[in-house]
Amino acid sequence: CPGAADKIHRVYNGIAMDQFPTAPIEDFGPLRIISVGRLIEFKGFHHLVGACRRLADRGLDFHWTLVGEGPWRERLEGLVAEAAISPHVTFAGVQSQESIKRLLAASSVFCLPCIVDSKGASDILPTVITEAMACSLPVVSTHLVGVPEMVIPEETGLLVDPGDESALADALARLANDRGLAKQLGKAGRARAERVFELRETSRQLAGHFDRSTGPRDSEATPAATCLYLLDAWPPAPEDDTWLTEEIGALKSTEEGRAVDATLLSARCLRQGAPDSLPDWPEWMEFFPDALVLEAEWAAHPAIVAKVIEWRDELGKGIDTESYLFQARRALHLARLIEKRGIRHLHASRSAVAVTAWLVHRLTGIGFSFAIEAENPWSSSVIDRLAQDARLVSRADTEDGDSLQLQPIDLSRRLVLGPLKSKLPGQKSAPDRLPVYRSWFRQLSAVLS
């Protein structure tokens, strides 16, 4: 992209190196080749069949384990049978990540003979190569796209031209006959992976790029809002019956709502039709970044993560750990955003983001408030704990304190004749909720002043 070099940054896929065991390459015995990948044309496994036939013709003792499934399996099985090397090959099918780690650790060399297929598709930066390097395996692959960025020829592995079966066989035979070289390449590959592909390092790089791209605004930028109004999803799901659309509309249209001076931020975009009553919502709604970014920030701040995990026990058994950590990832990103923008108050519009708001408060000290609908995922003990730290709360899960009146309303028309009750066609008109919102926004403004 001419003229855009300063906007383009390369960040490799990272993996947690400490989760991969070291492969103890044997000094003697068969060369244990392993390949992992979908059984499709551009993986080039059909060329490895040809290379293995050459190894067998040389009398070299080897075994190839191929992990994966795909449309080329039947074709590959036919090629293996035709090459008369079936005793030397295992089609392992789909395996769990833990099983793949064990298979890598039991191997002597990792081989991925990738090519450009008949439609022009190819591998780019195969993560499985990084995983093999993490296990201290030497890598045999091809000079293709990003592979040379991962594998340094004669330093961490051996590379050949795509589709060159003779050169592929020579590279494998070389490692079979020189186990010292195989160990040397594997050790160097592990060291390179720790420097370049360790998850903590790649996460730090990614988080740094986002920090720089969302840095302080210049003096001509719009002044920061006082309050951040946090939503779980926008537009609201079709089944949402908590009047969130009406509330947001009132926030943007009433004098009391505008006085709150709120920025709207939604954790998720449901990408469905927006409510007709708010046609201009894209102009003022912001969204969380992709989950990959949240995970990168989480991995890049282990000290903060440890602190957040310690707070888990304060909420007891009323929230499961998986849900807590999901909220915590959101909170870590939000805490960093709030500090940059100078926002003074955080409001969680519904229960789905209440724990997030509480965690942001714990991380930054910012004041927060929240509203809880009658039907919500948290136990009363969790909500009670959140309320202890909040500056303003609306709770429809209790008999009092429902400032936003989020209790469900029965709009059905009924006829009562003594002890007899029956439903009538149609529905009653919904009550005018605008006074409720105005009252709520006045309470929120008072907290902010």
Image: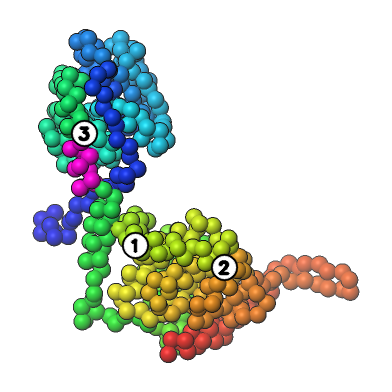
Residue numbers of the magenta segment: 187-197
Task: Establish if 126 lies above or below 270.
Answer: above
Labels 3 and 1 touching (C-beta < 8 A):
no
SS of the residue at dot 1? helix
Q: Reply yes or no: does residue 242 show up in magenta.
A: no
Residue 182 is situated, as x and y percent measured from the top left of the image, at 19, 28
The residue type indicated by label 3 comes to Gly
Residue 122 is situated, as x and y percent measured from the top left of the image, at 23, 35
Residue at point 39% right, 25% down? 92
Quarter of the C terminus within the rendering? bottom left
Residue that carries the numbered disc 1 in the rendered image: 303
Tell me the crowding category of disc 2: few under 14, some 14 to 19, or many 20 or more residues within 10 angstroms, Cα based: some
Tell me the crowding category of disc 3: few under 14, some 14 to 19, or many 20 or more residues within 10 angstroms, Cα based: many
Task: Give the Cα distance between marks 2 and 1.
Answer: 25 Å
Task: Establish if 197 lies above or below 153.
Answer: below
Q: Is residue 421 left or right of residue 32?
A: right
The answer to whether residue 263 is seen in the rendering is yes
